[in-house]
Amino acid sequence: MPKNSKVVKRDLDDEVIESVKDLLSNEDSSDDAFKKSELMVDDQEEKDVDVEEGSDVEDERPAWNSKLQYILAQVGFSVGLGNVWRFPYLCQKNGGGAYLVPYLILLLIIGIPLFFLELSVGQRIRRGSIGVWNYISPKLGGIGFASCVVCFFVALYYNVIIGWSLFYFSQSFQHPLPWDQCPLVKNTSHTFVEPECEKSSATTYYWYREALNISSSLSESGGLNWKMTICLLAAWVMVCLAMIKGIQSSGKIMYFSSLFPYVVLLCFLIRGLLLNGSVDGIRHMFTPKLEIMLEPKVWREAATQVFFALGLGFGGVIAFSSYNKRDNNCHFDAVLVSFINFFTSVLATLVVFAVLGFKANIINEKCVIQNSEKILKLLKTGNLSQDMIPHHINFSSITAEDYNLVYDIIQKVKEEEFDSLGLKSCQIEDELNKAVQGTGLAFIAFTEAMTHFPASPFWSVMFFLMLVNLGLGSMFGTIEGIITPIVDTFKVRKEILTVICCSVAFFIGLIFVQRSGNYFVTMFDDYSATLPLLIVVILENIAITRIYGIDKFMEDLKDMLGFSPSQYYYYMWKYVSPLVLLLLLVASIVQMGLSPPGYNAWIEDTAIEEFHSYPTWGMIICISLMVLAILPVPIVFMVRRCNLIDDSSGSLAAVSYKRGRIIKEPINLEGDNTSLIHGKSPSEVPSPNFGKNIYRKQTGSPTLDTAPNGRYGIGYLMADMPDMPESDL
């Protein structure tokens, strides 16, 4: 019904109701279904009802309480731990400030268009990922199932990271922090520093030995780590309680979980800028290395980061947008959330390198002091001449600049025997070039820097509470990408499904809290998502542009948004994005083939990491993760293609009418039983062949018995024929 004809529509509705009453009065009185004031053929209660825009009938699908709540949910899902501990690492590794150029270009080419695509289909069709792609083409319904499988795999290990953060958060209420100093070991004769800690560092030792109690290989299970098991249970309980009522419960929590990280990041940035050496870190961060920007590897890593930063392919974006009104401006949402994500990454990068610059200065000062003492000893023993040392140098209060001056002089004079002197070059840049990513950044580098902060427990509490909130925001979207499609498709109770899903995930997740669990986290992170998600998004793009039709999709967007989207998106979706995604898929496969499959194992005796190749059974798991994630696509395609499952019922069991209009599509049609949900134009849709013919056509009337939206319904049919004599009923 047109948007601007509400008065006419109400008149038609009244006519429809009267006509239905006449119809019901002429039906067989023994049919209980026709004794009701409204025709509801489906026996089960339908809560998730799809209604047309402009209808007076309330949409019974849950909806966001406000636009702000929805935006915060999308931001919380897209902004995650990767913004804090992967983007800064990639920026530092791939040309500093120059890395932002390929990142922004790829954000415009694949990030925003594909994010807009997922928002649009979710909002237009108002279903989760399974329902959306079934609507486009049932043969492609496996795309939604594949998204659910990937979401489940990611949720398994992602919540373990939240558990780690909860553990560190609980240990932060101590002064000094427990990872501030190496522990002492006592024996019968004397006390000494723990050898493993002395060989590494206090924060490294605490992470590997106290927190993870890690084993020395993937094959050595070592049993459950009970501390991390409790933390994992707590993490899943938090997720379950937040998600049990769907967006009605998780939406309210988004106000805190999405906004709190920004408060912490801003506090850390202000505090970091006041620290000695923070400017060195930021300068190092944004000093562009333009030559690196031209390497293909930089563009591949930038594309991968754009892809995962926005949560494309997971189904969470589609699930969240499916609770929107159909006239919501999802184009504005796509651009807004994408750039919020980008600026969050830049903000996190500033914070990380301000803190790492401070840490590098601390380490550099220790290096200068230790090597200055070596020089004094060499001067006393006569290995070095006092004449080499400039007169203004005072070793009792030597600066980094003075030390480097002395170092350069000694290196030139003692060129042949310089290596035997054991002196080190103390450069801040050398420390900053050691910037790490992932858990190494959060649980080792950052924790070490915070031990030097005034009021370090407070900053530690804030930091790990921020990590918990970042993780939970992403987990809500990930779990929504599992729950919403299943609820929409199989009509199970959301509360029960949420509890079952979280319980099963917790028990499977126990493999990640063994002493060897960290190695399984690495395995799942490397193999469970990258390739499957790329394939999912490529198929999503093809489904819209080739199967559904890009021209028809653009018309749908115009009808939904009230304006025509830029032709830029037309060309991006049809040509550029699929090509870039295919190139990224090929590059990822090549990279995976060239990189030896393995993991870094922590060796207790040497207190360093060593690269180990996966055992045979480990490789089987890696391959199985990728295969299982993408397997639903060909399975569903073959099942639909070969009609292995006959879902025709020959009745009206899956059709419901309310106020004279259809609110759920019939499942049994003549010929192609999928043509209706394909969204074909009315001229292409065959007439329905229901088991009971509940209405008759007027003689000489058009052959098309559809509502204006291409759906079949009594009310619309009869509203279109107001002059039909009652005798014809």
Image: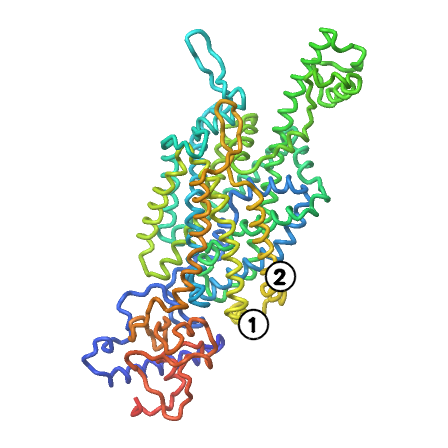
Q: Is residue 169 above or below residue 523?
A: above
Q: Quadrant of the N terminus?
A: bottom left
Q: In the image, 381: left or right of 521? A: right
Which image quarter: residue 142? Answer: bottom left
Of the numbered discs in the image, which one, if any, rests on residue 551? 1
Tell which of 241 and 147 is nearer to you: 147
Asked whether the residues under the numbered discs 2 and 1 touch, taking CB atoms below 8 Å apart as contact, a structural biologist would say: no
Estimate the spatial distance between the alpha carbons at disc 2 and disc 1, rounded to whole Å: 16 Å
Q: In x, y percent, where is residue 453?
A: 56, 27
Q: Quadrant of the C terminus?
A: bottom left
Q: In the image, 385: left or right of 368? A: right
Of the numbered discs in the image, which one, if any, rests on residue 576? 2
Under circle 2, the secondary element is helix
Give the color scheme: rainbow, by chain, secondary structure or one colour: rainbow
Q: Residue at x 68, y 42 (%)?
A: 95
Q: In x, y percent, where is residue 634?
A: 44, 60
Which image quarter: residue 576? Answer: bottom right
Q: Residue at x 54, y 23 (%)?
A: 200
Asked if one can make out residue 562 in the rendered structure from this viewpoint, the answer is no
Q: Is residue 14 above or below residue 494?
A: below
Under circle 1, the secondary element is helix
Q: Along the polypeptide, which appears first: circle 2 or circle 1?
A: 1
Asked if one can make out residue 320 in the rendered structure from this viewpoint, the answer is yes
Q: In x, y percent, where is residue 44?
A: 27, 66
Q: Callout 1: few (<14), some (14-19), or many (20+) C-alpha neighbours within 10 Å?
A: few
Q: Residue at x 49, y 27 (%)?
A: 603
Q: In x, y percent, where is residue 277?
A: 66, 29
Tell which of 723 and 683 is nearer to you: 683
Q: Callout 2: few (<14), some (14-19), or many (20+) C-alpha neighbours within 10 Å?
A: some
Amino acid tagged 2: Val
